[in-house]
Amino acid sequence: MTFRGTFDLTLDAKNRLTVPTRYRAAFAEGIVLAAGLEDCVAIWRPEDYDAWTASALEGHSPLSPEFRKLKRHFTANSHPTELDGAGRVMVPRFLLDSGKLTKDVSVVGAGECLEIWDRMGWAAYNGEVLENVSEIAAGLQSTGG
C-alpha cells in the first residue's frame, strides 16, 4: 500500500489521533509509531517499519558506533501500539516532544508510511520543498539518487 494525501486533524485531550478512514484497514495488525528523521512522527505497519530499518542498516558493520547509534534510535524512539475501536491511536508524550507536535496536526502520506507533523511545521516545510522542487529533483538526478 502507498500512503498518499494530506489530512488536517486535531489531537484530542488524551493525545489521540483519529487515523484517516481509508487507511485504518492497513493498520489492522498493529502500528509502530516512530520518531521521524525530520520533525514528525511516522505511523508504520510493523512489518514495513522492520523492513525499512533493516534496509537503512544493511551493509554496515554492527561494530561501528554509527550503526549502533542509528539502531538504538530506531528501537528506542518507536512505540508499538494499535488502533482503538474508534480508529484512534494514542501518541506517547516522548514522540509528541520529538516531533514537536501540538494539538493541530497534518497527517501526510509518505509512501510506505504516514507522517504526523505539527500543522504549522508541515506548512513551512512543504512550502520550502514546493519552492525548490525542481532543484531537488535535479539534484537527485545528478547524483543518481
Image (cartoon, rainbow, N blue to C red):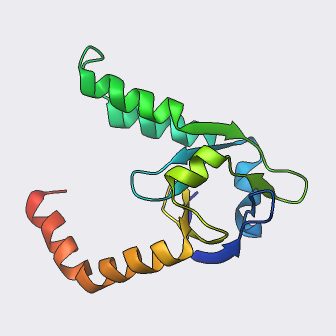
Q: Is residue 140 left or right of residue 68?
A: left
Question: Which residue, as the protein is rendered here, is positioned at the far top?
Answer: 63
Residue 45: % across, % down: 62, 45
Q: Is residue 119 left or right of residue 38?
A: right
Residue at position x 64%, y 78% in the image? 8
Question: Which residue, as the protein is rendered here, is positioned at the far left?
Answer: 142
Q: Is residue 50 left or right of residue 135?
A: right
- Asked whether 24 or 104 is in front, the reply is 104
Residue 1: % across, % down: 58, 57
For residue 140, above or below residue 58: below
- Asked whether 32 or 128 is in front, the reply is 128
Image quadrant of residue 32? top right
- Asked whether 111 or 16 is in front, the reply is 16
Residue at position x 52%, y 38% in the image? 77
The reply to whether residue 43 is in sight is no
The reply to whether residue 95 is in sight is yes
Question: Which residue, as the protein is rendered here, is positioned at the far bottom?
Answer: 131
Residue 6: % across, % down: 57, 76
**The C terminus is located in which quarter?**
bottom left
Residue 114: % across, % down: 57, 59
Residue at position x 48%, y 60% in the image? 111
How many tags in the picture? Answer: 0
For residue 58, above or below residue 111: above
For residue 66, above or below residue 83: above
